[in-house]
Image: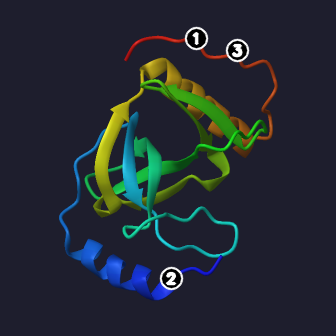
Amino acid sequence: MIKDFDNWNKLKQTLERRAPVFCNERELWWCSIGANIGTETSGKNELLERPVLVLQVFNKHSIRVAPLTSKIKNDRFHTKLEYHGVQGWVILSHSRTISAKRLQRKLYKINMFQHEWVMRRLDGIHHKRIGSGFPEPRSRKA
């Protein structure tokens, strides 16, 4: 797959001029992730975007997100997330801090239980203790 780094550079310049987008933890957004290197998660379409889950809001400029994929991934680096009748997998190993200027369109807000589940799984991969007895998430309304 050939990546369009020139287009991504032009888009980054446009994003840099934008005001930060207001968001909250637990929200799913379309986000201009960009054209990235190697196996790093890249965006698609003209805005080089993909859905992300807002994990943490540091301030109005900086947020921590994790990209989502529709591909079934049953390993310790991904966790299943169901939202608004859609099933996806959070790519825990690709979570990172980004500028809120990258956010494009809000999709949905997951419930607190789902967010806690994702955060515990994320904590687990950083401490290598996934599979140590975390219960499966229960469905609850947001």
Q: Position of residue 74 (x, y in %)?
A: 77, 36
Taking depth in this image into account, of 65 and 73 the one nearest to the observer is: 73
Write down the residue under mark 1. Answer: 138
- Asked if residue 92 lies left or right of residue 33, the reply is right
User: Which color scheme is applied?
Assistant: rainbow
Location of the C terminus (image quadrant): top left
**Residues at circles 3 and 1 in contact by the CB criterion of under 8 Å:** no
| Residue found at x 46% / y 55% | 50
Q: Position of residue 80 (x, y in %)?
A: 63, 31
> Type of residue at label 2?
Asp
Q: Residue at x 42, y 25 (%)?
A: 84
Image quadrant occupied by the N terminus: bottom right
Position of residue 52 relative to residue 116, above or below, is below
Q: Assess whether mark 1 and mark 2 are in contact (beta carbons under 8 angstroms).
A: no
**Number of residues whose C-alpha sits closer than 10 Å to that of mark 1, classed few (under 14), some (14–19) or many (20 or more):** few
Tag on residue 135? 3
Q: Locate residue 11, reporting x and y percent.
A: 34, 77
Q: Residues within 10 Å of mark 3 (few under 14, many from 20)?
A: few
Q: Which residue is mark 2?
A: 4
Q: Residue 30, labelled with which disc? A: none
